[in-house]
């Protein structure tokens, strides 16, 4: 079919991002990946950090965050500042934990060869005890769910062949199983393109369906699952819906409802959907680096909602830029959490004290977490400097350390990163804006909101201490506002959807000279373009994860350091 045909079918409709009306202080913002103490792995083949398969659980007005291979878990009052709680009473070296509240008690289970269920009446205290030492199902990627009527269900599965399954549990008898497991979700990559294996859904076979999660909304049951693999950029979460907790389930054609294949860091799969204190829905998910090891992963947090037709959506547009944390009930269809701080550092001129071969300074500003700048040493005094090319307003920074040449493993004592950041108008006279010389927190994606915005052209980060190895940055990201004009709106969009394989489409548009990048929005209804892909430096995009024979609608916005220009609607 011709591009004109598909342009008529798809069109360019509606805006999904609107100005936020949240009256918030800037300190109440966050930036993905979450600013946590990602622990080094025990893996002896390489040194890398890992946290994945997250669950956020609201219990007695506190948020608890559990993740794979974490050595413990975190808690928070506001989901902005997290405190780590190490644990010796939980199997924190297992993958894919799940928790649920039953009668004011938290129950915990994780993927393990010998399945055990643990419980705790106060997870602030590391006093977990075994509730069931012989849970009969040996599985991977468990999910517990308590229904409104008190009945409890269990979902599980992690395979490129086997299905996602579910079974009822007996809350009056140690959560033992009732009956036999039911097959709930199979593999359908030939119909659902996002399930196809491969970095670009191009592997020609089924991916891994895994990471089940259940959410009940307005009397319906939403069974979520991840595919095609935790190590690829297209990792996302899809959803089936049913009138009953064990089905039968119907595929929701806007799947994957959670996906983030573009931008600085990618992936938004194997997570959980939950409500905050105000009733807002969120989706916390796994984000991928997967360079040193396929399980080198991080955690991202995104707003989510159910629309008027009961479809579940997750908003990942500008999903690794600063977002505001709301303190009230939100309407995500009309209100945005985007902080309106644009990226100032992309592809700007960079100089450094030294460069390791294969890791030039430019890699600190290319919006790709999978490569990085590295100095030749980890000595105090190594530095990197960015020229923003004009005076800009700087509101926040995200310092993403790369751990180059680290040999650290879980169990080692980890010295924290210590550094300082300075600003200058002329590159000669400097003033300190961030002082981390006494930092004691082991964080590798350090997000810093300045107490007051500063005007500067040059920003310089100087090393004082590294945990091990060389001073290295996968992203030295500077957020704020430039002083110029918005980019021009995108024009000349064409869409070519492959007639032989409608799971794939190619989008092309006229290059906007003054744009930093583009956001491609799309969806299965004209005014519900909740899927998005961020594109830097290109004026085309190949989408390979569409659902077969499902119509889609598109819009493309352009953006630069001064703001966003919405694409024309057709």
Image: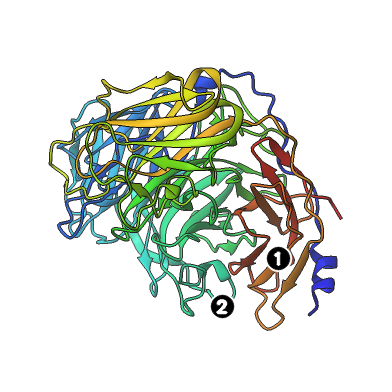
Q: Quadrant of the C terminus?
A: bottom right
Q: Position of residue 140 (x, y in %)?
A: 30, 60
The answer to the question of whether label 2 and label 1 lie on touching residues, with beta carbons closer than 8 A, is: no
Which circle marks residue 381 in the picture?
Answer: none
Residue 43 image-quadrant placement: bottom left
> In the picture provided, is 218 more to the left or to the right than 126?
right
Q: CA distance from mark 2 to mark 1?
A: 21 Å
Q: Nearer the viewer, residue 424 or 397?
A: 424
Label 1: element kind: strand
Total marks shown come to 2
Q: Position of residue 480 (x, y in %)?
A: 58, 29
> Mark 1 — residue?
507
Which residue lies at the image location 65% right of the left edge and 23% below the top edge?
Answer: 22
Q: Position of residue 358 (x, y in %)?
A: 34, 58
Label 2: element kind: loop
Crowd tier of the residue under label 1, counting other residues whose Cα lies within 10 Å: few below 14, some 14–19, many 20 or above: some
> Mark 2 — residue?
190
Q: Is residue 124 above or below residue 165?
A: above
> Seen from this angle, which residue lies furthest front?
428
Which residue lies at the image location 43% right of the left edge and 56% below the top edge?
Answer: 212
Which residue lies at the image location 62% right of the left edge and 26% below the top edge?
Answer: 329
Q: Is residue 390 above or below residue 317?
A: above
Residue 248 image-quadrant placement: bottom right
């Amino acid at each position: 079919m011709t591009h004109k045909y598909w342009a008529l079918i798809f069109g360019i409709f509606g805006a999904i991002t609107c100005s936020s009306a949240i009256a918030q202080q800037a300190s109440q913002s966050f930036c993905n990946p979450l600013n946590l103490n990602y622990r080094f792995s025990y893996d002896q083949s390489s040194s890398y950090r890992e946290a994945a398969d997250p669950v956020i659980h609201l219990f007695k007005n506190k948020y608890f965050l559990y993740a794979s291979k974490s050595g413990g878990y975190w808690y928070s009052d506001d989901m902005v500042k997290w405190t780590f709680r190490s644990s010796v009473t939980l199997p924190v070296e297992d993958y894919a934990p799940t928790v649920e509240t039953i009668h004011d008690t938290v129950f915990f289970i994780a993927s393990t060869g010998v399945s055990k269920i643990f419980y705790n009446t106060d997870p602030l205290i590391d006093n977990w005890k075994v509730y069931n030492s012989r849970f009969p199902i040996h599985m991977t990627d468990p999910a517990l769910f308590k229904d409104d009527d008190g009945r409890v269900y269990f979902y599980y599965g992690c395979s490129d062949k086997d299905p996602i399954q579910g079974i009822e549990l007996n809350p009056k008898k140690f959560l033992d199983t009732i009956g036999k497991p039911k097959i709930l979700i199979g593999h359908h990559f030939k119909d659902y393109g996002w399930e196809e294996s491969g970095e670009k859904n191009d592997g020609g076979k089924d991916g891994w369906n895994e990471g089940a999660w259940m959410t009940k909304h307005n009397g319906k049951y939403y069974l979520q699952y991840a595919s095609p693999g935790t190590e690829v950029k297209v990792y996302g979460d899809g959803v089936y819906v049913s009138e009953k907790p064990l089905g039968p389930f119907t595929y929701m054609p806007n799947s994957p409802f959670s996906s983030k294949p573009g931008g600085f860091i990618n992936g938004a799969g194997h997570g959980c959907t939950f409500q905050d204190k105000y009733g807002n829905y969120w989706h916390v998910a796994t984000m991928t680096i997967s360079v040193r090891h396929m399980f080198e992963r991080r955690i991202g947090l995104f707003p989510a909602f159910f629309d008027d037709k009961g479809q579940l959506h997750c908003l990942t547009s500008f999903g690794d830029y600063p977002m505001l944390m709301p303190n009230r009930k939100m309407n995500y269809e009309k209100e945005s959490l985007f902080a309106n701080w644009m990226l100032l550092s992309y592809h700007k001129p960079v100089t450094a004290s030294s460069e390791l071969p294969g890791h030039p300074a430019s890699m600190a500003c290319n919006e790709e977490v999978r490569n990085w700048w590295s100095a030749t040493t980890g000595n105090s005094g190594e530095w990197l400097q960015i020229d923003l090319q004009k005076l800009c307003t700087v509101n926040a920074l995200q310092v993403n350390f790369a751990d180059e040449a680290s040999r650290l493993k879980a169990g080692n004592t980890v010295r924290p990163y210590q550094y300082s950041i300075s600003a200058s108008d002329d590159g000669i006279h400097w003033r300190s804006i961030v002082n981390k010389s006494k930092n004691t927190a082991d964080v590798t994606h350090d997000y810093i909101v300045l107490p007051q915005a500063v005007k500067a052209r040059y920003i310089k980060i100087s090393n004082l201490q590294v945990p091990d190895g060389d001073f290295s940055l996968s992203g030295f990201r500077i957020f704020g506002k430039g002083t110029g004009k918005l980019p021009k709106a995108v024009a000349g969009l064409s869409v070519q959807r492959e007639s032989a394989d409608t799971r794939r489409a190619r989008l092309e548009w006229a290059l906007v000279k003054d744009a930093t990048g583009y956001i491609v929005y799309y969806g299965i209804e004209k005014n519900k373009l909740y899927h998005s892909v961020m594109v830097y430096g290109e004026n085309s995009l190949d989408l390979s994860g569409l659902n077969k024979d499902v119509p889609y609608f598109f819009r493309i916005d352009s953006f630069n350091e001064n703001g966003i220009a919405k694409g024309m609607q057709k």
